[in-house]
Image (tube, rainbow, N blue to C red):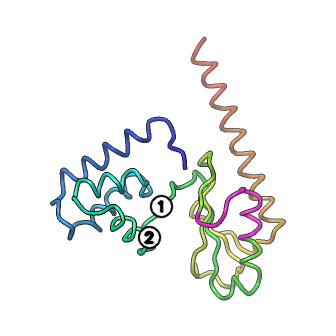
Amino acid sequence: MQYVEGEKEEILSCVEEVLSNSAKDRENLIPILQKVQARLGYLPTLAMEKIASGLNVPAADIFGLATFYNQFRLNPPGKHEVKVCMGTACYMVGGDIALESFERRMGIKEGETSEDRLYGLERVACVGCCTMAPVVVINEEVEGKVTPTRVDGIMLEFEDMEKKEAADKQQGEEGGSQ
């Protein structure tokens, strides 16, 4: 994953601040990782390397811990977060098909974020809306009965939203430069 402009500096600054406000011993590793993730939205490789250096522990230990606990996210969140339920009810009526449809339309696999950081795609356990299966949670809003056709509709809504935001931004820039 490529860093966006200014992101490396933000990562290094965040880690330095968290480490300066934390006891630098191995027992604080999980809280340090949690604080960094809370600030950045994920745990980038650069942050984990800097934490390893700051705590004087092998980077492999940091990576091992971050990959062991599912609370830690190794990819940056997308602007539009899509979480496909894979609980039993959703899976039985096509949750896997919905997930495959999102993967195809977004050009990413489950657990990844698109290069432009517009989309993030996750597989999640039961979200508690079994009567609406298959269920997808999009930007914290529940969508039920998601079929491949509905996936296409959702993606078109995203694309229209992005076009409108780009047009609004361009109009604002043109208005501000007059």
Residue 85 percent across, percent down from the top left: 63, 76
User: For the view shown, which residue lies furthest in the top direction?
Assistant: 178
Residue on which the image places disc 1: 74
Q: In this view, does 88 lie to the left or right of 20?
A: right
Q: In this view, does 171 lie to the left or right of 14?
A: right
Quarter of the figure that contains the C terminus: top right
Helix or strand or loop: what does disc 2 sit on? helix
Report the front residue among 142 and 108: 108
Residue 122 percent across, percent down from the top left: 60, 67
Residue 40 percent across, percent down from the top left: 41, 52
Q: At 61% across and 72% down in the image, what residue appears?
A: 123
Helix or strand or loop: what does disc 1 sit on? loop
Residue 46 percent across, percent down from the top left: 39, 50
Name which quarter of the figure residue 80 lies in: bottom right
What is the number of callouts on the image? 2
Q: At 75% across and 55% down in the image, what residue appears?
A: 155
Q: Looking at the image, is 169 positioned above or below residue 29?
A: above
Q: At 84% across and 65% down in the image, what residue appears?
A: 149
User: For the view shown, which residue lies furthest in the left direction?
Assistant: 23
Is residue 97 in the magenta section? no
Q: How crowded is mark 2: few (under 14 residues within 10 Å), some or many (20 or more)?
A: few
Amino acid type, label 2: Thr
Of callouts 1 and 2, which one flags the residue occurring earlier in the amino acid sequence?
2
Report the front residue among 128 and 4: 4
Amino acid type, label 1: Leu
Q: Give the range drawn in magenta.
A: 99-111
Report if the CB atoms under discs 1 and 2 are less than 8 Å apart.
yes
Query: Residue 67's mark?
Result: 2
Magenta part, dominant SS = helix
Q: Is residue 8 left or right of residue 171?
A: left
Q: Looking at the image, is 145 positioned above or below residue 107?
A: below
